[in-house]
Image (cartoon, rainbow, N blue to C red):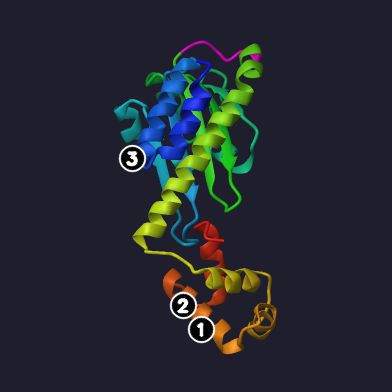
């Protein structure tokens, strides 16, 4: 138990597969006293079509039910984690039953009776959510105090590692690689500088600045420099 943080840190440096990282998270979840583990990530690689990753070891029947009824739209744990970094300790026995479905009763019937949800975010706007759940034993204040730091560390470490894998994979698929000069032009553009101002700062011609910006826009598949800046930030290229 003492080495799980080192194990996850080591795996995060070597892992090239999100499933490999999640397998370690499931093992840690069990060590912490929770039979179920779920991780979700909302990645704004595109404003119009953000990417979502869902990993969990919930019963397959519940996963199907959750997807079929689109429970993600009403799930109060998701709603909480989208708006707060505070942990959410929940139980189907004490939860608000005023949902337009039998959400909590169904969750309990599949063994998801008690849980701990923790949100996480990073500097490029990627949101994540880790939930550990079990079928019995309410989470006491003492347990919360003893595990709060570990839970936050696990959520953030898992989030950062998976986000890096996903962003690296997206860049590889799109064959995205910006040169040093392209990044410089893009960074100054992000600061609101015009092409002529960037040219003075970098001691190059305005025509060269425009050339680099056009290359960046083509690589990122966008139509203007504002979109180029936003997409580059989302992909962690700046």
Read off the residue under disc 2: 215
Q: Nearer the viewer, residue 17 or 179?
A: 179
CB atoms of marks 3 and 1 within 8 Å: no
Mark 1 near mark 2, Cβ–Cβ under 8 Å? yes
Report the magenta residues as a range.
136-141
Residue 47, image x and y in percent? 50, 61
Quarter of the image with the C terminus is bottom right
**Closer-to-camera residue (29/7):** 7
Prevailing secondary structure class for the magenta stretch in the rendered image = loop
Q: Residue at x 62, y 42 (%)?
A: 83
What whole-number distance in Å separates the C-alpha atoms at marks 3 and 1?
A: 49 Å
Count of labels shown? 3
Residue 183: give its label: none
Mark closest to the chain's N terminus, 3 or 1: 3
- Residue 236, position in %: x, y? 53, 56
Q: Nearer the viewer, residue 112 or 98?
A: 112
Mark 1 residue element = helix
Give the structural element (helix, strand or loop) at label 2.
helix
* Distance between mark 1 and mark 2 Cα atoms: 6 Å
Q: Which residue is mark 1?
A: 211
Residue plotted at (44% across, 31% down): 38
State the residue position of label 3.
Answer: 68
Measured in 3D between alpha carbons, the distance from the residue under mark 3 to the one under mark 2, in whole angstroms, is: 43 Å
Q: Reading the chain from its start, which is encountered first: label 3 or label 2? A: 3
Seen in the image, is 48 located left or right of residue 95?
left
Give the x, y percent position of residue 108: 43, 20
Q: Position of residue 193 (x, y in %)?
A: 68, 77
The mark lying in front, picked from 3 and 2, is 2
- Where 163 falls versus 38 (above or below)? below
**Residue positioned 43% across, 59% down in the render:** 49
């Amino acid at each position: 138990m003492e080495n799980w943080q080192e194990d996850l840190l080591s795996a995060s440096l070597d892992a090239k597969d999100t499933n490999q990282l999640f397998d370690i998270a499931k093992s840690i979840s069990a060590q912490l006293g929770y039979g179920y583990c779920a991780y979700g990530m909302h990645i704004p690689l595109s404003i119009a079509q953000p990417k979502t990753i869902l990993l969990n070891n919930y019963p397959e029947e519940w996963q199907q039910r959750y997807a079929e009824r689109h429970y993600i739209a009403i799930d109060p744990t998701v709603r909480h984690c989208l708006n707060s970094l505070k942990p959410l300790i929940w139980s189907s026995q004490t939860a608000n039953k005023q949902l337009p479905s039998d959400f909590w009763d169904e969750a309990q019937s599949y063994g998801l009776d008690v849980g701990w949800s923790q949100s996480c975010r990073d500097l490029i706007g990627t949101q994540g959510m880790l939930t550990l759940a079990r079928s019995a034993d309410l989470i006491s204040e003492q347990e919360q105090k003893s595990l709060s730091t570990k839970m936050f560390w696990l959520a953030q470490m898992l989030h950062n590692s998976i986000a890096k894998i996903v962003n690296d994979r997206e860049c590889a698929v799109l064959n995205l690689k910006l040169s040093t000069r392209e990044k410089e032009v893009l960074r100054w553009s992000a600061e609101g500088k015009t092409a002529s101002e960037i040219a003075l700062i970098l001691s190059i011609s305005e025509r060269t600045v425009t050339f680099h910006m056009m290359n960046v826009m083509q690589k990122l598949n966008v139509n203007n420099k504002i979109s180029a800046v936003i997409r580059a930030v989302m992909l962690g290229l700046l």
